[in-house]
Amino acid sequence: MTPERVAILGLGPSINQFLEFTKRNGSRKTLCDEVWGINALGDVFKCDKIFHMDDVRVQQVRAAAAPASNIAAMLEWLKTTDTPVITSRAHPDYPALQEFPLEDVLNALQFDYFNSTAAYAVAYAIHFGVKELSLFGIDFTYPHAHAAEKGRACVEFWLGIASARGIKIRLPQTTSLMDAVLPRKDRLYGYDTQEVIFNDAGEGKLKLEFKELSELPTAEQVESSYDHSAHPNPLMQEVEE
């Protein structure tokens, strides 16, 4: 039976918001029907499915080269878990592994664009008819930091497909995914001389107001907004402190 509401958990900093939400509300069921964890998060949080798209044969090579690594520890757990693990290729030493239905998903969704495990998880949810997706820890990039992890564009692409099919998307305010970490007004490029005010018009509609700003931004402020060089990362600073 396909769950209507699914939370996908990744390894980024915004995973903390899943913990905060569920503990304050008393149960994960207040947020979702199922939790799908990426990789080793399946051994950290109670998950209904785990997505680990790396072939364990490759992971075993990595573990043999570094027996004290996180990969080696994860493989030992993957051998014993009874939670279904969606992966690229099953292996007899890992009974919980189930192969991702790649052919069915490609035929149904028409795009062969998957460069991360999280992207596969989103496409899986679309294919099986999930109605609401919440994503925590699926961050990839961080505010004011130049370095980024591969995969954000691919996940956002699949979230666009999901939204077009009527799936509701929910994101924590601390994730950079879909610029959710930014104030709402800062997600609209080009409105530098106006304040865009969002009003609820009911039935899921918006009524916008446009308020002229009393002063134009300075040249320095405009140039700063185009500056993509490395800056201190406030999220990482908060964690380190």
Image (tube, grey):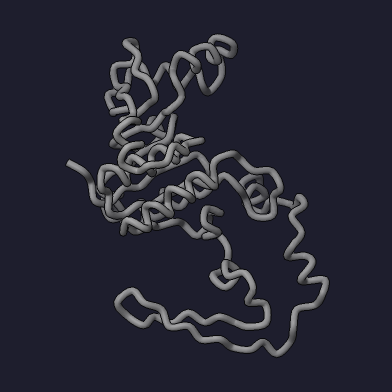
Give residue 19's position: percent from left, percent from top.
Answer: 41, 48
Residues 41 and 170: in front is: 170
Which quadrant would residue 201 be assigned to in this image? bottom left
Question: Quadrant location of the N terminus?
Answer: top left
Which residue is rendered at x = 53% and y = 23% of the image?
Answer: 70
Which residue is rendered at x = 50% and y = 60% of the image?
Answer: 173
Give residue 217's position: percent from left, percent from top.
Answer: 75, 78
Give residue 20's position: percent from left, percent from top.
Answer: 42, 53
Residues 177 and 75: in front is: 177
Residue situated furthest left in the rendering: 1
Which residue is rendered at x = 49% and y = 13% of the image?
Answer: 60
Which residue is rendered at x = 76% and y = 50% of the image?
Answer: 230
Q: How many marks?
A: 0
Residues 19 and 34: in front is: 34
Residue situated furthest right in the rendering: 220
Give residue 145's position: percent from left, percent from top.
Answer: 69, 50
Is 227 situated left or right of 2 in this image? right
Q: Is residue 117 above or below residue 24?
A: above
Which quadrant would residue 194 be assigned to in this image? bottom right
Is 71 situated left or right of 189 in this image? left
Q: Is residue 149 above or below residue 194?
A: above
Residues 21 and 221: in front is: 221
